[in-house]
Amino acid sequence: MKHLKLFEEYYDGEDEVFSFVTRAYDVKKAWELIHENPENFDLSTMKISEIERWFGIPRYKEDGTKYFTAGVGINMDYAKEIPKDKLDEPGIFVVDGDFQFPIDGWHRAYRRWIDGEKTIKVYVIDKIEDVNKIKLN
């Protein structure tokens, strides 16, 4: 499992980790918890305006791919190619003490934002025993 700097999501086909400075969460395990007992997790509506500042500053890779830095590292090209039927899939929001942040759904939120949508659905993981199951440090 690889941890990346500042804000980033990493997916290698097996492990998916969301890292924030010194915190890291296992996104795959979070989804497993939700799918095992969906009734244990609130499905809430989050205003995209509450997280849009974390989309970051646009930059370009050598191949011309546009992405954002100084934020969660959104790949705009990837986000723009998300099929419309996938945009309603919820993300995951974690409440871990002072850390209250989405750990999954950033590309969908960005795409919804550029499409003019104001909200995204998120599952909320806020019980300490569940947070500890997905926390990697």
Image (cartoon, rainbow, N blue to C red):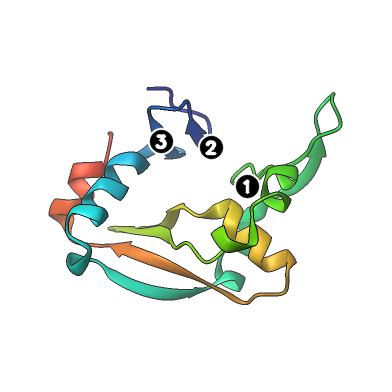
**Measured Cα–Cα span from mark 1 to mark 3:** 16 Å
Mark 2 element type: loop
Image position, residue 52 (x, y; %)? 63, 63
What residue sits 18% from the left and 43% below the top?
133
Image position, residue 62 (x, y; %)? 84, 24
Tag shown at residue 17: 3
Quarter containing the C terminus? top left
Residue ID for mark 1:
71
Q: Is residue 23 above or below residue 43?
A: above
The crowding category of the residue bearing disc 3, from other C-alpha atoms within 10 Å (few below 14, some 14 to 19, many at least 20), is: many
Q: Nearer the viewer, residue 73 or 6?
A: 73
Q: Amino acid at mark 3?
A: Val
**Measured Cα–Cα span from mark 2 to mark 3:** 12 Å
Do callouts 1 and 3 mark residues in contact (Cβ within 8 Å)?
no
Q: Amino acid at mark 2?
A: Leu
What residue sits 22% from the left and 50% below the top?
33
Q: Earlier in the sequence, mark 1 or mark 3?
A: 3
Residue ID for mark 2:
6
Q: Is residue 37 above or below residue 61?
A: below
Do callouts 2 and 3 mark residues in contact (Cβ within 8 Å)?
no
Q: Is residue 58 above or below residue 83?
A: above
Q: Earlier in the sequence, mark 2 or mark 1?
A: 2
Mark 1 element type: loop
What residue sits 28% from the left and 34% below the top?
136
